[in-house]
Amino acid sequence: MDRFTGQRRVAVIGGGVSGLAAAHRLRRLAPGLDVRLLESGPRLGGVIRTHRESGFLIEGAADNFITNPPHAVDLCHDLGLTDELIRTNPNGHGAMVVSRGRLEPIPPGFVVMAPSRVWPLLSTRVLSPLGKLRSACELLAPRKRGGDDESLESFVTRRFGREMFERLVQPLVGGIYTADPARLSVAATMPRFLEMERKHGSLIRAMMAERRQRGQAREEHGGARYSQFMTLRGGMSRLIDALGASLPADAVCHNAPVHALDHDGDGWRLSYGDGGRLDADAVVVACPAPQAAAIVRRVDPTITRLLSQIEYASCAVVSLAFGRDQIRRPINAFGFVAPRIEGRRILSCSFSSEKYAGRAPEGAVLMRVFIGGALQPGLLDSPDSGLVELACQELAALLRIRGGPILSHVTRQNHAMPQYHLGHLDRVAQINQRLLARPTLALAGSALNGVGAPGCIASGQEAARRVVAAMESSPIGRAAPGGVV
């Protein structure tokens, strides 16, 4: 029997995928809960936004999600979206990297920051002979002593040398985090590789052992393991729409920025919008770190200080469409990344219509160009027209494109990407320690434990589980269903 019959209320602050996942899980765990979601803007979804124009399907942020861990794909199944899930084009050819002004394939079996095969690394044209030799010496590099946090740049150069870092790892990591690897914590961003070093003494040995143990087929392409990614036929906004539709009609309040949160007796009081108030027995704060810091400032100044230390980067996504006959270089990959050492003014380019079906009309190619990030923030000072011109110039040089685009669309992701800098795990641990004294308050979102859709979904679901467990062990709540002013 459901223990919550309407006299208990949970407020979720933030209508991005983390907050929506939290609200959805709350309803699944305790159908009798009165769940209220407060979104500061006019729409749900946060950075996730799908735009349709002239037969093109354009994503403003993430255009897919990894299936392992399975949080995103499991949620799609739960929402009845199974028939809409699609995989990457099985005939695709991995990714490329700009190397000395030309596009070269990323070595087969190379995944983010480590190779699973030695020969492709030794035969690639991306690295010089000395760079290849130094990379192969990773097999002999000693383990790091001491447990202090290490930057991703330091970790990779220590094991593989600077050339492999600059030519392969930096652009691949930049494509994920839009970040400065010299400041990123490897423990917070790529803990799997730290464990490989600890257990095997070599990332190459670990990758090869992992492939043998799982009986995996030989990786024929480099970059991301695209076979592990999926999306929705109608775009990522289908997930947002389905999550919103799973909630009662009166559960969502748009244009309701929360100004303050106070602990009021046995529960919580939220002040939002233009004088609105909401009483709740538990609260999930699922918004970016700066907003979350402001919301909890009267509850716990220490949490506010820790959240305020989490920095963010911005980028622009410039979507461009060309006729296939305009592109004189073969499009035989899912996209490419651009190392900083190459001096390009873009971070990466994804060939959307080559990755997934239904993204462009017949005879057209849709591309998404990423500009800015932590290392080139000044480029975002340009107007949208300037960003389109910049992206066209870069693509014309690398792909030998003739003529202008048949469609262009710019999405700016301002302060949207949290940066897991050195010390991030310590900050998160301190936040979690402070929250132990407030079991009916939970934080969720990309600022803490994961920047992709699966990580955001997992954080929202865990926040829901936490506050439900806390309410189940506490006396009957104080917030009546009519407690909204």
Image (cartoon, grey):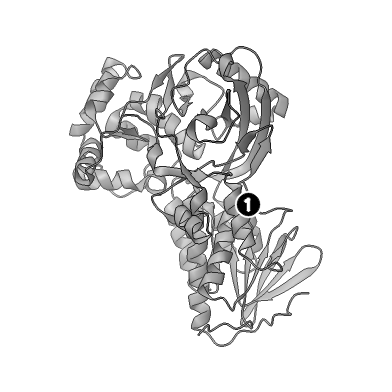
Q: Position of residue 352 (x, y in %)?
A: 53, 32
Secondary element type, mark 1? loop
Q: Is residue 16 visible?
A: no
Q: Quadrant of the C terminus?
A: bottom right
Location of residue 418 with respect to 108 vertically, above or below: below
Q: Position of residue 179 (x, y in %)?
A: 50, 37
Location of residue 450 with respect to 173 vertically, above or below: below
Q: Residue at x 67, y 31 (%)?
A: 409
Q: Report the side of 277 relative to 414 (left or right).
A: right
Q: Report the side of 291 relative to 25 (left or right).
A: right
Q: Report the side of 154 relative to 289 (left or right).
A: left
Q: Residue at x 74, y 53 (%)?
A: 42
Q: Residues within 10 Å of mark 1 (few under 14, many from 20)?
A: many
Q: Position of residue 428 (x, y in %)?
A: 47, 57
Q: Nearer the viewer, residue 163 or 182?
A: 163
- Find the residue positioned furthest to the bottom: 475
Q: Is residue 426 visible?
A: yes
Q: How many marks?
A: 1
Task: Check disc 1 and report the residue beneath it.
Answer: 45
Q: Position of residue 246 (x, y in %)?
A: 60, 64
Q: Hey, what amino acid is under mark 1? A: Gly
Q: Nearer the viewer, residue 218 or 279?
A: 218
Q: Nearer the viewer, residue 199 or 111?
A: 111
Q: Nearer the viewer, residue 322 or 140?
A: 322
Location of residue 388 with respect to 473 vertically, above or below: above
Q: Report the side of 39 relative to 130 (left or right).
A: right
